[in-house]
Amino acid sequence: MKTVTNLVRKARATIKIIFSIPDYDKYLKHQQEHHPEATPMTEKEFYMCSLHERYNSGKINRCC
């Protein structure tokens, strides 16, 4: 059962990387390691910030 759980976890992480979906757990780990004094964003704040950066950055993110 542990193997299946690990496989699903790895597949989920791979899909997130392929489709550029932000990873909240990775963000929390980074915050804890590099900015322990700062209060991390909530999961909702993190995703809203990620969406804002992706679509309101002024860069064109499409083929046409």
Image (cartoon, rainbow, N blue to C red):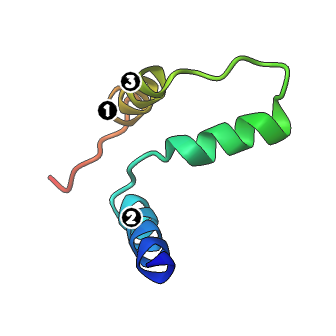
Residue 61 x, y percent position in the rendering:
29, 46
Q: Looking at numbered disc 3 in the image, what kind of residue is underneath it?
A: Met
SS class of the residue under badge 3? Answer: helix
Q: Quadrant of the N terminus?
A: bottom left
Counting residues from the start of the chain, the first of labels 1 and 2 encountered is 2
- Position of 39 compared to 57: left or right? right
The disc at residue 12 is 2
Q: Single out the residue that lies furthest toward the front.
A: 1
Q: Is residue 31 above or below residue 6?
A: above
Quarter of the figure with residue 22: top left
The residue sitting at 45% across, 67% down in the picture is 9
Q: Is residue 50 above or below residue 63?
A: above
The residue sitting at 38% across, 24% down in the picture is 48
In three-dimensional space, the C-alpha distance between marks 1 and 2, rounded to whole angstroms, equals 23 Å
Q: Looking at numbered disc 2 in the image, what kind of residue is underneath it?
A: Arg
In three-dimensional space, the C-alpha distance between marks 3 and 2, rounded to whole angstroms, equals 20 Å
Residue topped by disc 1? 55
SS class of the residue under badge 2? Answer: helix
| Foreground disc of the pair 3, 2 | 2
